[in-house]
């Protein structure tokens, strides 16, 4: 069984922000595989299903970004999951918009949601899919960049990134993380 976690902020005000790329990827996966994220447990909206022969839990923590690890650890413990079966999807300012990077493990960098996940799992050894959102333009505040409104003309590029991330997660489930890394990195 895999836990596929998309990081984001739960309120409608954050829906169309760069910081919610993880939620957007999980929603795309849910739509493609007809998995409803209609249940709530352990501070997270979730749904269960089968993707490429693997049982999955799709999760959107409702704790707000900086406390995402609180929900992740609850699901890990309840379903008795190993870290290698927890895939976390999140936005990354160090990648250009539209790009995706997959890693088996690694530190959280400056991402507060990932800092929380690493803290609660007490490990940085779990797969992650990073969706590029790019650096803020000169003179733009970093916080405004990640949680502020995204110009309409930028959405197609961000959507391209979330589509690639969706395909990357499916590839991880289908053929393993090494194959996914070879295809998408």
Image (cartoon, helix red, strand yellow):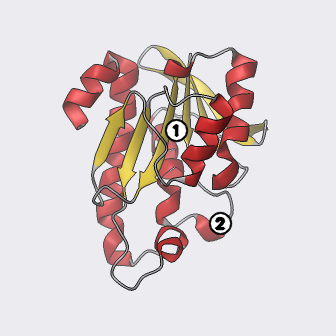
In the depicted structure, whether residue 133 falls above or below residue 150? above
**Upstream in sequence: badge 2 or badge 1:** 2
Q: How many marks?
A: 2
Q: Which residue is label 1 attached to?
A: 30
Query: Which quadrant is the N terminus positioned in?
Result: top right
Q: Residue at x 51, y 53 (%)?
A: 111
Residue 168 appears anywhere in the view:
yes
Q: Which residue is drawn at 47% across and 72% down?
A: 142
Mark 2 surroundings within 10 Å by alpha-carbon count, few (fewer than 14), some (14 through 19), many (20 or more): few
Q: Which residue is label 2 attached to?
A: 12
Mark 1 surroundings within 10 Å by alpha-carbon count, few (fewer than 14), some (14 through 19), many (20 or more): many
Q: Nearer the viewer, residue 4 or 70?
A: 70
Q: Nearer the viewer, residue 78 or 109?
A: 109
For the residues labelled 2 and 1, the Cα–Cα distance comes to: 19 Å
Q: In the rendered image, which quarter is residue 68 located in?
A: top right
Q: Which residue is drawn at 67% across and 23% down?
A: 76
| Residue 157 image offset from top left, x and y in percent | 29, 62
Q: In the rendered image, which quarter is residue 37 located in?
A: top right
| Residue 49 image offset from top left, x and y in percent | 57, 24
| Residue 56 image offset from top left, x and y in percent | 56, 23
């Amino acid at each position: 069984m895999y836990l596929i976690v998309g990081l984001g902020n739960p309120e409608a005000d954050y829906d169309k922000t760069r910081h919610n790329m993880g939620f957007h990827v999980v929603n795309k996966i849910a739509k493609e595989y007809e998995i409803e994220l209609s249940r709530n447990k352990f501070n997270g909206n979730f749904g269960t299903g089968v993707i490429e022969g693997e049982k999955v839990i799709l999760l959107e923590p409702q704790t707000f970004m900086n406390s995402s690890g609180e929900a992740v650890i609850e699901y890990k413990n309840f379903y008795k999951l190993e870290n290698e079966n927890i895939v976390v999807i999140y936005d990354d300012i160090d990648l250009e918009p539209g790009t995706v990077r997959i890693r088996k493990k690694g530190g959280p960098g400056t991402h507060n949601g990932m800092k929380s996940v690493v803290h609660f799992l007490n490990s940085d050894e779990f797969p992650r899919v990073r969706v590029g959102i790019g650096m803020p333009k000169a003179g733009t505040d970093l916080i405004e960049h990640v949680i502020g409104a995204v110009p309409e003309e930028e959405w197609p590029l961000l959507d391209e990134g979330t589509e690639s991330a969706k395909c990357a997660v499916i590839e991880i489930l289908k053929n393993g993380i090494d194959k996914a890394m070879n295809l998408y990195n």
